[in-house]
Amino acid sequence: MKRFVLPYLRLGISRRSLLKAMNCVLLAWIVMGQAAAEETKEWKTTKGEIWQAEYLGKGDDDYVILQHSPAKRQSYRIEEFSQEAKDFLTRRSAALGTPLDDQKLAKMVRLPNNADSTIRLPLRFILVHGIVMNKNGVAMRMWVSPQQVKESILPEINRIWEKANIQWDLECMIDRPFEEIADSKNAIASIERSTRDGMNVDNARRTERIGALSGVKQSHPSIHQIYLFPFLGSTYQGFATIGGNVAFLGVFSDKASGGKKPPTACLLTETEPMKFGSIGRTAGHELGHNLGLLHPDRKTQKEFHRLMGGIKHGYNLTAEEITTARKHAILRAEAILAAAKSTSDPK
Ligand SMILES: [Zn+2]
């Protein structure tokens, strides 16, 4: 009879160190699994088939959208899946919440009673799924979960904006499969190549392409929305329109190394003083742009460690910035209230 020799004996590794190593591998697998488990899943059908497919989001009514391979995306009726898959979708839907109508959005808004009191505004997050981007050997995809938005990113945004007494309340989150545009593949490759310095063709259409792939045309007209996208181009972490209501954040970035090292998953939050710039801090910064704020002029800047950047980035807002941001927040609140009034008035 052939004797079975365990590989660790053959290699002369002690059993204890092998178990230790196995524990490390297991731990690494669990940690990586947490990032992957959200989007890649086994889908068992009622016919007993098992598919490995990435979850992209829920379509209209009772449809779920899956990505089988980069080229194969399909919608399925939820009833085609096993109970386990249905349970996953129920949990996911509950975590995301539902977009509200104009009347309910208006109820989330609070105008200030006096010059300093709290302004409350609804905030929506869109998680863009299905894009795998590559830079320096790193595969980047959506990894932020609804729980992480709710428990880390949103509280950090509110911690930052408390200085201006502006409070953001989560309206809902949306899982959005990326929008297939005419040249999706080239558009994604162009974003991967783009860098902050050069005035080349990749940079020129960067924000437009990210918007198109994210389905920005489907944005709500009046509330603030934050789109989470895998990667926005080398050394970028976010962008937003000044005075607008949409902002984009990358969940991977190479900004900390100035683009010299491969991108890494961004921190959700970080302790002060700021070192890398977290998703929470970038969200706070981009909302600042939406509320009418610009980057400080480095030549005349007197206050430092500011949310809006300049010399030494941080979390501070100047008195002038607070006044400007509150003015914009009140205009935004009034627009939401006006939309509710126009839809409730008899025609
Ligand atoms: Zn900025």
Image: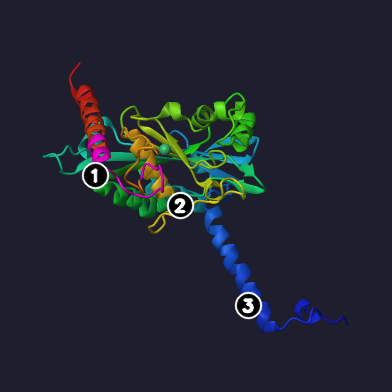
Tell me: is circle 1 under 8 Å from ligand 1: no
Apparent side of residue 116 relative to residue 236 in the rendered image (left or right): left
Give the residue number, with chain letter if any, for mark 2. 87
Q: Is residue 11 visible?
A: yes
Rendered position, 126 above or below 86: above
Q: Secondary structure at mark 2?
A: helix
Instruction: Decide which of tag 2 and tag 1 comes sooner along the chain.
Output: 2
Quadrant for the C terminus, please.
top left
Residue 296: give x, y in percent of width and height: 36, 38
Q: For the stretch drawn in magenta, what is the main secondary structure? A: loop
Farthest top residue in view: 347
Give the residue number, with chain letter if any, for mark 3. 20
Determine the CA span between mark 3 and mark 2: 35 Å
Q: Residue at x 57, y 68 (%)?
A: 27
Depth check, front residue: 181 or 189 = 189
Rendered image quadrant of residue 124: top left
The image's mark for residue 164 is 1
Depth check, front residue: 232 or 325 = 325
Residue 71: give x, y in percent of width and height: 65, 35
Q: Which residues are magenta?
A: 307-324
Determine the CA span between mark 1 and mark 3: 50 Å
Q: Secondary structure at mark 1?
A: helix
**Residue 78 drawn in magenta:** no
Residue kind at label 3, given as amino acid type: Lys
Quadrant location, ligand no. 1: top left
